[in-house]
Image: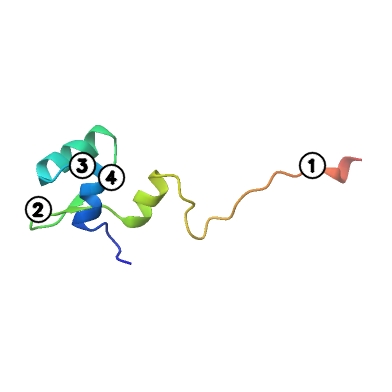
């Protein structure tokens, strides 16, 4: 698995083939990205997973338990 989304994955995310339209879509929905010196759109895979609702690696799930120390 790569650090950044592939061109195919960016297309699946944005439904846009042209880079300018991908950037337009990312800006419209408030996604963070970078552009390489060659003009390629770079979106971190972990950021995309977080935005799509997947748990972030290393982030522990918080469980809520009653505080029995006061009983």
Residue 61 in percent (x, y) is at 60, 52
Question: Mark 2 or mark 3, which is nearer the start of the sequence?
Answer: 3
Residue 63 in percent (x, y) is at 67, 47
- Compared with 44, 23 (above or below) is above
- The residue at which mark 1 appears reads as 66
Spatial CA distance of label 2 from label 4 is 15 Å
Q: Say whether marks 3 and 4 touch (CB < 8 Å).
A: no
User: What SS does tag 1 mark?
Assistant: loop
Residue 8 in percent (x, y) is at 21, 55
**In the rendered image, which quarter contains the N terminus?**
bottom left
- The residue at which mark 3 appears reads as 15
Left or right of residue 20, residue 3 in this image: right
Q: Residue furthest left?
A: 38
Left or right of residue 18, residue 14 in this image: right
Spatial CA distance of label 2 from label 1 is 52 Å
Question: Mark 4 or mark 1, which is nearer the start of the sequence?
Answer: 4
**x 37%, y 55%: residue:** 46
Spatial CA distance of label 3 from label 1 is 46 Å
- Looking at the rendered structure, the number of numbered marks drawn on it comes to 4
Q: Is residue 33 visible?
A: no
Q: Residues within 10 Å of mark 1 (few under 14, many from 20)?
A: few
Q: Is residue 49 visible?
A: yes
- The residue at which mark 4 appears reads as 32
User: What SS does tag 4 mark?
Assistant: loop
User: What SS does tag 2 mark?
Assistant: loop
**x 25%, y 47%: residue:** 12
Q: Say whether marks 2 and 4 touch (CB < 8 Å).
A: no
Q: Residues within 10 Å of mark 4 (few under 14, many from 20)?
A: few
Question: Mark 4 or mark 2, which is nearer the start of the sequence?
Answer: 4
Spatial CA distance of label 3 from label 2 is 18 Å
- The residue at which mark 2 appears reads as 39
């Amino acid at each position: 698995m790569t650090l950044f989304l592939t061109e195919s994955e960016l297309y699946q995310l944005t439904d846009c083939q042209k880079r300018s339209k991908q950037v337009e879509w990312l800006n419209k929905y408030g996604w963070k990205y970078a552009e390489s010196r060659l003009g390629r759109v770079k979106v971190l895979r972990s950021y995309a997973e977080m935005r799509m609702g997947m748990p972030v690696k290393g982030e522990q799930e918080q469980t809520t338990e009653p505080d029995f120390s006061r009983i």
